[in-house]
Image: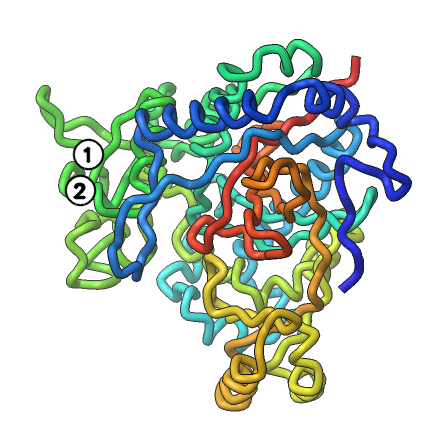
Amino acid sequence: MSVAFDEMTNGDGSIRPAYAALSRWLSNVPPDVLDYRRKEAEFIFRRIGITFAVYGDSDAQERLIPFDIIPRILTGTEWRRMSRGLEQRTKALNLYLKDIYSRREILKAGVVPEDLVYQNPAFRPEMNGQKVPHDLYVHIAGIDVVRVDADTFYVLEDNARTPSGVSYMLENREIMMRLFPELFADNRVAPVENYTDELLATLKSVAPHSASSDPAVVVLTPGIYNSAYYEHSFLADKLGVELVEGRDLFVRNDVVYMRTTEGPRRVDVIYRRLDDDFLDPLAFRPDSALGVPGLMSAYNAGNVTLTNAVGTGVADDKAVYSYMPDIIRFYLGEEPLLKNVPTWRCREADHLKYVLDHLSELVVKEVHGSGGYGMLIGPRADKAQIELFRAKLKQDPNNFIAQPTLALSTCPTFVEEGIAPRHVDLRPFVLTGSDKVRIVPGGLTRVALEAGSLVVNSSQGGGTKDTWVLEES
């Protein structure tokens, strides 16, 4: 593995311009002050109840995601370059989804193999020929981006189903502004607080044509036992809309209504934080008590918008990811502005042979895996782990992809031994409405708190940071 690019410091030890004011501030602030403010941040997070549950954890306790008080900083120029790439990618994802559920030109052209679509567990035949409002499928995308040098950003993953983490982006900023007003006075930091206004504008813009001029929007949650319930309630509150569970909604004559104390009220847009399988027991899993019977018939009739659309998962698995550069070229006739990590598809015999011969050097991932689970990080694995994955790959090669071990960039992070570099990634949120694309400057920076670790997921011990985009004066 090559040496990681440090986002604050150049190779000669000089400070990169974006971090100049922060560096001066850090050199003047005593460590005990930093520690006190870190504890204060943790206290605030506990008081407002920002926790998440770890599925499969034996004690299944709600946990606090560790918050690092040193911000990650990008220049306005870096951000604009990244934004253009994010917009391009999300546009291509929407065109791909529209195509594979209608004319399937990309399959006919042989750009993407048919079995990757038809045998994909997230493919929804129910969506074949289904017109969705405004031809938009992915209204809210979370695109995971990593950096390897001063100029190069790679997309690591596309999240096109129900991307989470935006509440942390917003709360992190609020806490930083409360704890470090002097830092904000020294830096022109672009705001992220308007995210919920932009989200509401996006959701209203994709309402069905039959909706009133002021469409009714709700957030649909599986309920309090879901690991991201805090985020669902946080967003509904910030959006100023109702947080509902399946039992709060019903369908009559292909129109969705919400039960209220003043009688039924029509619902036009459902921001659903519920997987496809559980949305409608009449269309998908009959044992689902979380969904709304008849919801799909209202959707098919064009009377309600679901964000994101049903069936978007077919576009965001790790095998489809490897075709994204070709997908962008096919639909947009453009070269990708953001790079893909080179990917070996173990479903292809020559790729599989290479991966089996180089397991100790590669990262191997399950095609449908998430949260950092089901992964092999070759350079950090012992012989037993490598042999276990060798057996898995031989048994079910279609289920895996492999990538080189990237030297993710590092940022200064406040850890027990003081300030030290730790690896980071970034999840910006891309909102696609019928009127325009909106991307607030920043996103959720996730940080691997263990020295040398490349796994940033909160479920695997990672933390989060505030992400600053500096506005040019």
At a point 86% along the width and 37% down the height, the residue shown is 13
Type of residue at label 1? Tyr
Q: Position of residue 466 (x, y in %)?
A: 57, 30
Q: Using the image as rendered, state which of residue 144 and residue 337 is in the foreground.
A: 144
| Vertical placement of residue 433 versus 344, above or below | above
Q: Secondary structure at mark 2?
A: strand
Type of residue at label 2? Val
At a point 64% along the width and 56% down the height, the residue shown is 452
Q: Residues within 10 Å of mark 2 (few under 14, many from 20)?
A: some
Q: Which residue is mark 2?
A: 251
| Vertical placement of residue 311 versus 184, above or below | below
Structure colour scheme: rainbow
Q: Residue 257 has which mark?
A: 1
Reading the chain from its start, which is encountered first: label 1 or label 2?
2
Q: Residue 104 has which mark?
A: none
Looking at the rendered image, the quarter that the C terminus falls into is: top right
Looking at the rendered image, the quarter that the N terminus falls into is: bottom right
Q: Using the image as rendered, state which of residue 416 and residue 77 is in the foreground.
A: 416
Asked whether the residues under the numbered discs 1 and 2 touch, taking CB atoms below 8 Å apart as contact, a structural biologist would say yes
Q: Using the image as rendered, state which of residue 353 and residue 465 is in the foreground.
A: 465
At a point 68% along the width and 88% down the height, the residue shown is 353
